[in-house]
Image (tube, coloured by chain):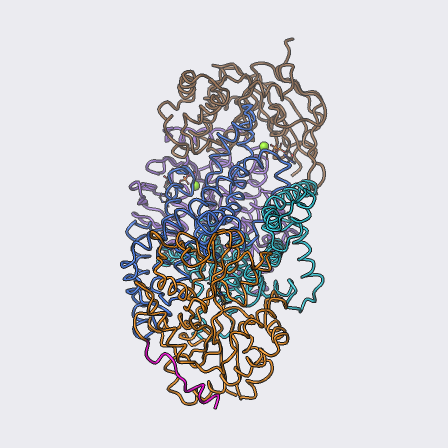
Chain colours: A purple, B brown, C orange, D cyan, E blue
Amino acid sequence: MKKPVIDAQAVDLTFQTGDGPVHALKDVNLQINKGDFVSFIGPSGCGKTTFLRCIAGLETPTGGKLTVNGISPEEARKSRAYGYVFQAAGLYPWRTIAGNIKLPLEIMEFPKADQEKRVEKVLELVDLKGFGKKYPWQLSGGMQQRASIARALAFDAEILLMDEPFGALDEIVRDKLNEEVLRLWAATNKTIGFVTHSIPEAVYLSTKIVVMSPRPGRITDVIDSPLPKERPLEIRDTPEFIEIAHRVRDGLRAGHDL
Amino acid sequence: MKKPVIDAQAVDLTFQTGDGPVHALKDVNLQINKGDFVSFIGPSGCGKTTFLRCIAGLETPTGGKLTVNGISPEEARKSRAYGYVFQAAGLYPWRTIAGNIKLPLEIMEFPKADQEKRVEKVLELVDLKGFGKKYPWQLSGGMQQRASIARALAFDAEILLMDEPFGALDEIVRDKLNEEVLRLWAATNKTIGFVTHSIPEAVYLSTKIVVMSPRPGRITDVIDSPLPKERPLEIRDTPEFIEIAHRVRDGLRAGHDL
Amino acid sequence: ADEVTLQLKWVTQAQFGGYYVALEKGYYEEADLDVTIKPGGPDVAPVQVLLGGGADVMVDWMPSALAARENGAPVVNIAQPFKKSGMMLTCLKESGITGPDDFPNKTLGVWFYGNEYPFLSWMGKLGIPTDGSEGGVTVLKQGFNVDPLLQKQAACISTMTYNEYWQVIDAGISPEDLVTFKYEDQGVATLEDGLYVLEESLTDEAFKDKMARFVKASMEGWKYAAEHPEEAAEIVLEYDETGAQTMTHQVRMMTEVAKLIEGTEGALDVGDYERTVASLLSGGSDPVITKEPVGAYTLDITDAALK
Amino acid sequence: MNKIVPVLTVLAVLIVIWYAAAVKMNSTWTFDQAERAGTEVSFSELVTDTMSQTRPLLPAPHQIATELWKTTVEKKITSKRSMIYQGSITLKTTLLGFGFGIVIGIALATVIVLSRVGRLTLMPWAIISQTIPIVALAPIIVVLSNAAGTGTLMVPKAIIAAYLSFYPVLVSMVKGLSSPDQMQLDLLKTYGASQRDVFWKLRLPSSMPYFFASLKVSVAAAFVGAVVAELSTSAIAGLGARMLIGSQFGEPMIMWAALFAAAILAAILIFLVGGFEKLARYMMGGRAV
Amino acid sequence: MKTDSTFEKLAWPVGFGLLVLVLWEIGVRVFGISPAILPAPSAILAAMAGSLPILWEDWVQTVVKGALNGLWMGSLAALVVALVIDRFDFLKRGLMPVANFFAALPIVGLAPIMVMWFGFDWQSKAAVVAVMVFFPMLVNILGGLAAVDPMQRDLMRTYGASHVQTLRKLRGPAALPFVFNGLKIATSLALIGAIVAEYFGSPIRGMGFRITTEMGRLATDMVWAEIVVSAVTGTALYGLVAGIEKRVTFWHPSQRGS
Ligand SMILES: Nc1ncnc2c1ncn2[C@@H]1O[C@H](COP(=O)(O)OP(=O)(O)OP(=O)(O)O)[C@@H](O)[C@H]1O
Ligand SMILES: Nc1ncnc2c1ncn2[C@@H]1O[C@H](COP(=O)(O)OP(=O)(O)OP(=O)(O)O)[C@@H](O)[C@H]1O
Ligand SMILES: Cc1ncc(C[n+]2csc(CCO)c2C)c(N)n1
Ligand SMILES: [Mg+2]
Ligand SMILES: [Mg+2]
């Protein structure tokens, strides 16, 4: 078997807070292979974000071992291995869409001419050609979110991490973007980590669904999806789909103590 | 046939804005009967909120006729016919949960002793017994939303209007609250208007689903649900459910021009 | 040319007309001096400016200069253009005041910021307490104008013959409605506008020479100003940067100031000096200065200037 | 404009009240004078007299307007008697102090935001600094800047203006520079950005709306500082100095006119800064409002 | 981020203050600066210790009689006017621009006029202070009253609440953080106003009187003693307002943080 891109072994993370320690991750084991599309699902506070941040080297586990391509996440981050997309598009309002996409390129000191080319390329990729000169507020929420994905794609990061990127959008727009993410994934063959609250979204997108549960945050189920790579939206009405969704829901329900 | 509680005939509403008129509602016809649970679904900007506000007398239609129990919404509002629940819980941070629920009671000048009793009753109804003395920020989002429902229930309004009450919550908490709303509805037999973005939520809750479409905002489909009043969560995996969901999605897709 | 900076004790007005005339008429230039005149203001203490090195010479009243000297600011009088005092207490007749005996239990307006010493010394001499105790006067810190009298907030206020007194008159109160007490007449006159420098700078012969030329030129200016009040007032207006001063006020001020410099060439009269010191020392329980000053004046400069 | 009618109404009412108050307040003097002269005054005499005193307790609006007209329109701008000339002096002080204030405010805010020790140490002192009445320090500032050899009073005046105007900038910039949330900071971290990148590409641009919002308050503070400085440290020139001279020589009209000129100038300044703010927002991709 | 302990919150600024004092003391001694220009901290301390009765008398005159009286009068007037303006939209539109014009007025310029009108004792100081604090308070109170979330206002409308009820139960509490903000500005203005007004006439006590008089006598140690008193007073007032704010607006996120 080929070596996993992301390898978490007994990862543990405890936050020290004013009200005492918070056990955000407990004994998390997970292997993600190159080209996987992994969704993380689970109730609020179960540590989805925290785990994603660990992968990106933004948070350091207090126990266990986590490697990315064999090196530490910290080092991987320094070598610019990650594209990170947050729930809110988080575009800079004082920069145009093109300017926003250029931001990481400027920081990473890509040559000027190359910057322009890359901006054009990713704008096309997310279907925003011609919107480069617009400011974020001149775009709809869905378009903004696509721009923020373009920003994460611009510098060819190997791993794309998305933390509830479509949480703020309405269902129809969300459907559209889900299709688009799948298309992107197929086109670039990136390894993708994706946090969501939506069961259909998780099932529709992923090759692997990680169900988590809180207090302390841990993995309760890992479901490998048997769905084909090619997924029209209608796949969501197939029995296989419903079957997996059911399993996810059960997993969630089990870990939920509300 | 008995007279509808809410009767909208050719309702039209145009906002005059700086950028010219916005046709928010066009030729809206709808009858809602006592005890109905009506969901409004549709893409952003299709006028769901606007229509709900018209019903509550917070906005005045510029055309057509809208009556509530035969009188104008304005008058119905003055006679305190409505309980209104917004997307955000909108609890007053300077009042305790009990204090928040007491707010409408104070304004409507219920006797002091009665106020206490009602607060106790609705807290129990939304499963928040014992949390009366807490401040809103000491509760989770789901609990806050339940408190805001309790607030709307406290004064026995005949009509309960909810504008995306669970939009900000995660799916699991949402499921829980959906069950609870159904239970409440069964227990009180209120007439409920409910705005949502979620197809499963709409189908799961409603006796009548109103599909809307934007520019100008209008009703494209009204679906009467054949589902029984008794609805366990699992009903969502039944063919009938999926069938209705499908119809709603088609209706949405048709009106959507993204 | 040698540079000299003169710090005035108040804003640009005819009270300092001589210096402005000397500057405008080129007397300073003829004496090979490059003079800068710095006006004062409510928050400008000339002695401080001198100490801080912001000026070479200042115009100040002797009581305040001597008090400063006792407080560790060694200033020395080098010339005394104003021979007579222009200070008085102006009272409304209707307040019932006819003489100093009527002062107790009345409210009197007084200037502070170093201008209060003549008053305190006078009251000390009269034995009238000013600290608000029984049988004393209520002292009011007068602002920059005569309103307290007009608004009848005070029975008497401090005025200068060349300025505030006329404002009271201008305001429509006739001289018959007023009772005035000139410090000169009450025998408590103290020396007013004199020129002072820091003691240590007098060890420098070049500086002394410069000051001699400065005093000489200034006195020429004063002489001319006294003889041509209209023109002097015009010159003052020329230098007034606020543009708010008026010809009427300044001509009158110049005319009145001319009376105060009558009979002096600018040299300090030692008799006047001793009278002032005696008056300041004798202030009852709370004298302005506590011991006879030593070396508080020099006649060297005027001797050199006027020979 | 749905404001013009109400504003005019309110102004009209205020002016009527003002005239009434002027008659009332100035009548004491009229009666006093009549008593001294031993004559009676009729009501119409009373009104005319109270409208035309040279030293009224409260000048009638038209008296102030006349004085303003005389000292602006009827005087050459270069004349010292022109209110415009005097205003320009105050304006210079204000702008210099405002400039200092902005620089100091931003510099301190940067230190405070970037360093924990800076924040713990400087923030309380910034607050304390504003509780010291600057007028008390004015003489000291004058003397010290004299001692430091700055010939003109421009510098001490500007220091006083800056002292009042840096604080709003500081407070807003501290808010602004720390306005990027954890998510935005983390985003740059995933790019492997340096502290410098974070400051220049994120913190500074995000602080701009806060910065612009503080400018109006700050320029008003600088203006007050400039007037107070002219009034107290150096009655040499400027609107503040005119107020003082007006007060000293019992010329209420000069004083009132200077006061109104100051208010008009302040309003213009704030309006201009507001316009600049809008322009800057627009240039930074803001939504036109 | 590390949280700041109370010790650190005190130690750093106090340490910094002490350091400045020590440097000041050394500087004055080493460079032999004349006490008439800048007294040493030790001399200031000695002056303070030696003239406590005078400092107390001045403090009562300026702070208690002048500043505090003016502060409450100005604030109360602002509150009343704000409530009236708020009630009548016509007034709001008409008065606000006028008020803004007056707010721009350098109100210290009114000091000589107030002394002329109200006499030389504390009444004129209180009048200057009252006018000075009136406009910032007015603007803040109106801003606070307007700062209510439209949703919250609509909620009150659905209860059929009256203007006064909305004011008491919603807009009043919601405006409090703004009011405190205004009060913080007002306290320092009050001190400045009371002190400057004394320049234009005063009894022979008061902090402004003492500062000018002692300055004329070259007693700078006494001048600084008054400055210290005023700074301590200002800081204490600010602290008092902040303390009350913390108690009264405990619910506001800015007070809950950290
Ligand atoms: N910086 C931090 N300091 C202290 N506790 C934290 C921190 N970040 C997260 N936590 C806590 O760790 C737990 C997991 O948080 P996390 O944000 O990973 O949850 P999540 O699954 O992303 O939730 P959500 O769906 O609400 O985004 C929570 O209890 C949270 O309060
Ligand atoms: N007060 C208003 N003034 C002007 N236009 C308005 C106003 N309120 C709503 N609109 C416009 O009316 C249309 C319908 O708005 P509405 O809020 O009812 O949509 P919605 O269906 O509730 O959308 P969402 O799902 O985003 O809440 C939109 O185009 C909106 O911009
Ligand atoms: C704080 C203060 N108040 C009043 C005056 C009054 N004053 C100004 S000039 C002058 C001499 C005659 O004009 C006098 C007495 C002042 N100097 N300082
Ligand atoms: Mg999260
Ligand atoms: Mg809506």
Specify whether B172 is left or right of C172: left
Looking at the picture, does residue C215 appear above or below residue B230? below
Q: Is residue E96 magenta?
A: no
Asked whether residue C186 is in view, the answer is: yes
From which residue to which does the magenta span run? C293-307
Single out the residue that lies furthest toward the bottom: C307
Q: Locate residue D248: give its quadrant.
A: bottom right
Residue E204 placement: quadrant: bottom left
Query: For this rendering, which residue is in front, A234 or C251?
Result: C251
Residue D262: x and y, percent? 59, 57
In the image, residue C179 sits, relative to residue A49, either above or below, namely below
Q: Quadrant of ligand 5?
A: top right
Residue in the picture at 57% in, 25% down: B245
Viewer-proximal residue among D36 and A207: D36
Q: Is residue C294 magenta?
A: yes
Observer-nearest of E63 and B187: E63
Point out residue E188 in the picture as x, y percentages from the top left corner: 44, 51
Q: Which residue of the protein is positioned furthest toward the top in this rendering?
A: B1
Q: How many marks?
A: 0
- x 46%, y 38%: residue: E176
At horizontal 56% and vertical 31% (from top left) the residue drawn is B197
Residue C288: image x %, image y %? 35, 67
What x and y, as percent, mark residue A163?
47, 43
Closer to the camera in the image, B54 or D62: D62
Looking at the image, residue C47 sits to the left or right of residue A230; the answer is left
**Residue A79 visible in the snapshot:** no
Residue in view at x 69 percent, y 48 percent: D48
